[in-house]
């Protein structure tokens, strides 16, 4: 009786261990969903794609939106932005979040600056540069390397005039 109970217990333990291990094994398979990188981390588990020494840049795409985060060498998040189809959104993350210039929201400090720009990140869609200010701050400029895609819709007038029952007027 004791041997029979011990055999059942070991079988039960093996079964539970296998069930618990299934999600871990599924994550390791190709094509399995991976957890998204976290924005705002000092040391995200991603590859540094910086084009300039002195900066660490992390970029990833989720739902067709590219997220770019710039950290300094001590891990301080400096600037973070999202971009899609040539448009930019500066995210409120980082010490320099108020000093990021984009085509739709250009900053005077970026436009009127004669300091040389250092390319910090560049791919076939986006270029991100840094300009070092005399006060020790950094102004970031993001530009699209392609034009934003137009998404205009044209209103078409109704085929026949409309009546306005609430006001008693007719379009005829």
Image: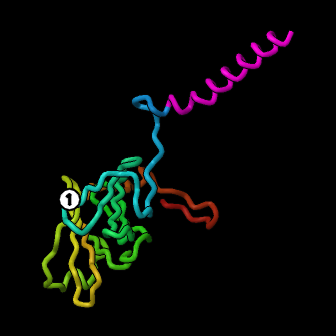
Model colouring: rainbow
- Mark 1 lies on a secondary structure that is strand
Instruction: Compare residues 68 and 89 and report the one nearer the observer.
Output: 68
Q: Say which residue appears at 45% left-offset and 40% top-offset.
A: 34
Instruction: Please tell me which residue lies in front, 61 or 22.
Output: 22
Does residue 12 belong to the magenta stretch? yes
Relative image position of residue 82 (x, y in whole percent): 36, 60
Which residue carries the number 1 mark? 122
Q: Position of residue 110 (x, y in %)?
A: 23, 80
Specify whether 102 is left or right of 23.
left
Q: What stretch of residues is rendered in magenta?
A: 1-26
Q: Say which residue appears at 40% left-offset and 72% top-offset.
A: 94
Say which quarter of the image contains residue 98: bottom left
Tell me if residue 113 comes above or below residue 42 in the rendering. Answer: below
Between 82 and 58, the one lying in front of the other is 58
- Give the prevailing secondary structure in the magenta stretch: helix
Residue at position x 30%, y 71% from top? 104
Residue 150 in the image, given as x and y percentages of width and height: 28, 56
Q: Residues within 10 Å of mark 1 (few under 14, many from 20)?
A: some
Q: Looking at this view, name the residue that lies furthest to the front.
A: 2
In this rendering, the answer to whether 60 lies above or below 40 is above
Q: Residue furthest right?
A: 1
Q: Quadrant of the N terminus?
A: top right
Residue 155: % across, % down:
38, 56
Q: Give the farthest residue toward the bottom.
A: 135
Residue at screen point 41% across, 67% down: 91
């Amino acid at each position: 009786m004791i041997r029979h109970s011990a055999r059942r217990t070991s079988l039960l333990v093996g079964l539970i261990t296998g069930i618990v291990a299934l999600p871990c094994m599924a994550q390791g398979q190709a094509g399995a969903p991976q957890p998204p990188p976290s924005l705002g981390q000092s040391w995200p588990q991603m590859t540094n794609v910086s084009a300039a020494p002195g900066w660490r840049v992390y970029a990833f795409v989720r739902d067709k939106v590219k997220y770019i985060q710039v950290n300094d060498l001590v891990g301080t998040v400096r600037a973070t932005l999202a971009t899609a189809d040539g448009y930019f959104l500066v995210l409120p993350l980082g010490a320099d979040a108020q000093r990021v210039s984009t085509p739709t929201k250009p900053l005077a400090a970026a436009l009127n600056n004669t300091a040389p720009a250092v390319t910090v990140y560049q791919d076939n869609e986006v270029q991100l540069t840094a300009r070092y200010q005399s006060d020790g701050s950094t102004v970031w400029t993001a530009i699209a390397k392609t034009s934003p895609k137009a998404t205009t819709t044209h209103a078409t007038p109704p085929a026949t005039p409309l009546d306005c029952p609430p006001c008693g007027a007719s379009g005829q």
